[in-house]
Amino acid sequence: EFKHFVILLKVLHVHKAHMPNILSGKSWMFQDGDYLIGGLFDIHHVDFSVHPRPEAIDCSSQIFSLSSYRRFQIMRFSVEQVNNSTNLLPDVSLGYDIFDQCSDTKNFPGIFNLISENGMVRPWRNSPENFFKSPNVIALIGPFTSTNTLAVAPLFMSYLIPMVSYGAASSAFSQKVRFPSFLRTVPSNKEIIDVMVNILVHFDWRWVAFLYSDNDFGTDGLELFRKAIKETDTCLAYAKGLNENTGHAQMFKQLDELNLNTIIVFSTDLDAEALVEAAVRLNVSDKVWIAGDTWSLNKRLLRLEGIENIGTVLGVAQSVLPIPGFDDFIYSTKCQMAKEQKFCNQYCNCSNLIPDDIISMDPSFSFPVYSAVFAIAHALHNVLQCGANKCNRDIEVQPYMVLDQLRKSNFTLLNVRVGFNDDGEPIFGSYSIVFWNRSSSAEEIGLYTFFPSVSFSINSTKIEWFTNHQVKKVPISQCSQECPSGYAKTQTGIHKCCFRCDVCPNGTYISTAEDPYSCIRCEETEWSEAGSTSCRLRLVEYVLFTDSGAILIISGSCVLMGLTVAVALLFSVTYNTPVVRSAGGPMCFLILGCLMLCSLSVFFYFGKPTTASCILRYFPFLLFYTVCLACFVVRSFQIVCIFKIAAKIPKLHNWWMKYHGQWAVIAGAFVMQVIFLISSYCFGAPRPNQDTFTYQDRIILGCDINIAATTLSVVVPLSLCSLCFIFSYMGKDLPKNYNEAKAITFCLLLLILTWVVFATGYILYKGKHIHTFNALAVLSSLFSFLLWYFLPKCYIIVLQPHKNTQQYFQGLIQSYTKTI
């Protein structure tokens, strides 16, 4: 903003030529008083295409602005009301010195007059005396635009002359280090941008264009808008600065190419008028226009022919407060000053104006001017320590004193509590949301308040949406249609609003509230189908003790134990008979005991798996079944040895009998298996496991087996099983009625078949009942030996006792010997 100050210095020598006129001239824009308030109003606007050079110009010859003229009259009326008040500044009169600021670089003579002292502008020095020399005015009302304010603010800041702007909304002025004596009676651009963003969010318009005046006011609004939409789904697809050289036809063509239906126009009224007139001329239609407060109540555009064809116009306007007595003031005001009496840029040819034109003009920014004057008056009232009837005229009023009291402002004006915060921002005011209806009027449809708290409301039912020249539902303004539920967005360009929709796969979900661009994986205990928006808890499954399969297997195990005990009792009673002796004698009781101990492992396949239950599923079975297999290896070897090896290798038979080889083998197998089991379980013991991969909607609880560790623990049983099968196969041609080798072979075949069937089922099926099948395989392995090895012997003992004699067995052996 200090670039304007540089330009000021360059043209200072031009302005000096006008200073004598400034000091000697008087005009009707000047009113004398005990204390003067400066005023800067852009009653005219410079056409830069006609005046490109930085030179002082006569503003009265430039483009006239009736709305600014109305605000100028508001200041005159406000000062008159203050002077007529018996409570405010009772014996003190206020005067004003108002200048037409038609340019930010071409009319500085008036500015110098405001800060001059006795016709001289003192250079600022870092000395206290600067603050004790009284400038021409104690405070300044204005300027209106941010650009004009930035141009002159450094001059007033240097002397701490209060500047109370009624329209400069740039957020830069909130920086008190740079603008210590600046205050304003309008909200900053940030507030109006917040209102616009709230409108976009309310109607879910995400694909928008932002057209702004190519000046400090507009660029500040653009920067604030970019920041405001960062936390929303809104995308700024197009932004362009507006000035007198803007090519509207090309711009609207670009908007159509981008399929932009929502246009925010954050500009001065002149730029907005040129834009809307071009839109009507170029037959632009079916758009939604969001107007800023500078032109949302523009009466000229409201009555423009063809305005209804451009689409729907929504606007953000300052809440209009009727100012009592202003209309009468305008009717009583007459322009009587002749042009030759003019002061430099203190003249306005108003002879062709009628009061009704002024009164019916856009009332925006009227209350900000009105409240600015009264704020300064109240501040002066406090500086002069005014009472009910008089003020202390002995106090030498300095601008910084007025500034201090301005910051403390707290008074009620037209039922509005007027005050400022520490940054000089107003702590009062609100914005109305308006709709341009068919009656060529701006109808209020909503409200945005700042104080005491922020609130936003809008009545959408009052809006008639003009699209395709018909009244329809809310227009859509999106780059890409919203994704269906359960789909994630994948950005396809530089804008987050442009995307494709991809369905979230199984096991994931999309949470649009958290992140609409990523499919979130469900927790291990949850599941989801494709295209889900949430996860569901998985059903945890394991075989309960009350399960029908579990009941049957447990019952079978109990039957096994009962039969085992019965066989053991029967064998103990008939222990010295040939059948029991030939079955293994004392070894039978060892086998039966191991079978009973093995059956205990069946009980641990049911219920919720724990570390202990996982270990006890396998440890008893692998240990004691190894002993059973060792017994059968020894038994099958003894049968073959008696009938085939003893005669051929008598020494082996003698050694076997002498050193009790059968018990040595059984003990060795037992010890070796204990070592292997302890070693493998130390390396990796079975532990509870959750199968979360087989089924997406269920978790199967089971026991995890370390394959490497388990391999070591099955080496001995597999080896014994192989030896047993070899020895029993060698005895396949033994006596028919005395062929225990065939019985062992058949038991082994059943054992192998059982585990082959289980392995096949384990590969094909992974549900909870696989543990039931595992328990069934264990039980089947135990029953194979009990039923096919011991039960036939029990049958002979009980039902064929004649075969359970010494003579019968000797006869079988003699018959076999003769055959050989």
Image (spheres, rainbow, N blue to C red):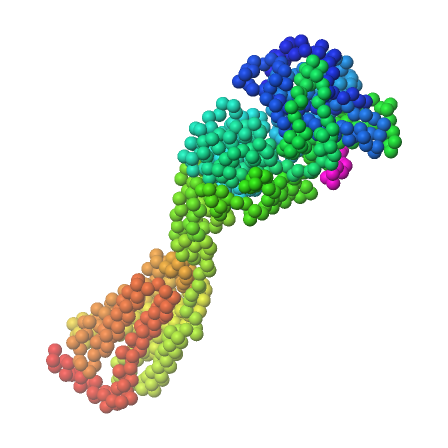
Residue 571 placement (x, y as % from top left)? 32, 84
Which residue: 54% across, 26% down? 214
The part of the image, by quadrant, that contains residue 228 is top right
Closer to the camera in the image, 800 or 134: 134
Query: The magenta stretch spans which residues?
Result: 406-416
Taking the magenta stretch, the answer to whether it contains residue 342 is no
Task: Report the quarter where the C terminus lies.
Answer: bottom left
Vertical order, 743 against 774 (above or below) = below
Vertical order, 23 against 143 (above or below) = above
Q: Is residue 471 visible?
A: yes
Which residue: 58% across, 35% down? 296
> Is residue 792 left or right of 298 when viewed as pictured?
left
Taking the magenta stretch, the answer to whether it contains residue 407 is yes
Q: Is residue 115 visible?
A: no
Task: Report the quarter where the N terminus lies.
Answer: top right
Residue 548 placement (x, y as % from top left)? 39, 75
Closer to the camera in the image, 350 or 285: 350
Could you tell me how many numbered marks the image carries? Answer: 0
Vertical order, 665 against 467 (above or below) = below
Which residue: 27% across, 89% down? 799
The part of the image, by quadrant, that contains residue 155 is top right
> Is residue 627 left or right of 100 when viewed as pictured?
left
Closer to the camera in the image, 269 or 368: 269
Vertical order, 303 against 621 (above or below) = above
Q: Residue furthest left?
A: 819
Which residue: 23% across, 77% down? 743
Residue 246 placement (x, y as % from top left)? 48, 25
Residue 40 placement (x, y as % from top left)? 68, 23
